[in-house]
Image (cartoon, grey):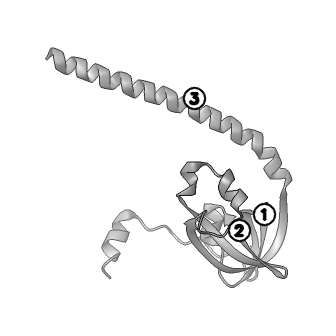
Amino acid sequence: MHTLTTVLLVILAVLVVILVALYFYGRKMQERQSAQQPAFEAAKQTISMLVIDKKKMRITEAGFPKMVADQTPWYIRWMKVPVVKAKIGPRVMTLMADENVFRVLPLKQECKVIVSGIYIAELKSVRGGVPAAPKKRSLVDRILRRNK
C-alpha cells in the first residue's frame, strides 16, 4: 500500500505542475491577444466579394504568401483552417475565415463581409438574406448516417 500511495502522490504532483504551467501559458496568450486586438479592429473594412470556393486546408497548402506561413505558430501550421477563395473586384484572392463565418458563407453568391487583412471576421449581408447556419451533426448522427 505504501508504494501505491507514493505513485499516486507523484502522479498528482505532476498533474498539478502541468496545470500550473498551462495556467500561466494561457494568461500569456491572453495578454498577447488583447495587445493585438486594437490593431485588428483598426484594420477592419467592409468589402463586397463573390465567393468562388471554400474548404478546410492546411495553411501551407492554401496558397497564402510565405510570410503568412512563417508568422503562424508551429502548432497551427498543421491544423486545417477555413480557407475561402473569393473574387474581390477584379482580383481573385485567398482569404482565411472565422469558423462561424465559414459555415454560413454561401458559395457562388455575392456578399458583404468585414475583413481585417486576409481574415474574414464577420458576414454582414448576402443578396437574398443571410442563410441560416447549418446545424452541426452530433457524433452519434455522423456515425449512424455514415453508411447511408
Disc 1 residue type (three-letter): Val
Dot 3 or dot 2: first in sequence order is 3
Which quarter of the picture shows residue 129? Answer: bottom right
Q: Is residue 92 left or right of residue 20?
A: right
The residue lying furthest to the top in this view is 2
- Determine which of the numbered discs, if any, sits on residue 115 in the image: 1
Whole-Å distance between the Cαs marked 1 and 2? 9 Å
Q: Position of residue 55 (x, y in %)?
A: 58, 73
Please name the residue shown 84% across and 66% down the image.
46
Dot 1 or dot 2: first in sequence order is 2
Please name the residue shown 44% across and 24% down the image.
17
| Other-residue count near label 1 (Cα within 10 Å), few / some / many at <14 / 14–19 / ≥20 | many
Residue under numbered circle 3: 24
Q: Position of residue 35 (x, y in %)?
A: 76, 39
Disc 2 residue type (three-letter): Leu
Disc 3 residue type (three-letter): Phe
Please name the residue shown 65% across and 76% down the image.
131
Residue under numbered circle 2: 95
Q: Position of residue 109 (x, y in %)?
A: 71, 83
Which quarter of the picture shows residue 121? Answer: bottom right
Q: Is residue 9 left or right of residue 91?
A: left
- Between 138 and 121, the residue placed more toward the observer is 121
Q: Quadrant of the C terminus?
A: bottom left
| Other-residue count near label 2 (Cα within 10 Å), few / some / many at <14 / 14–19 / ≥20 | some
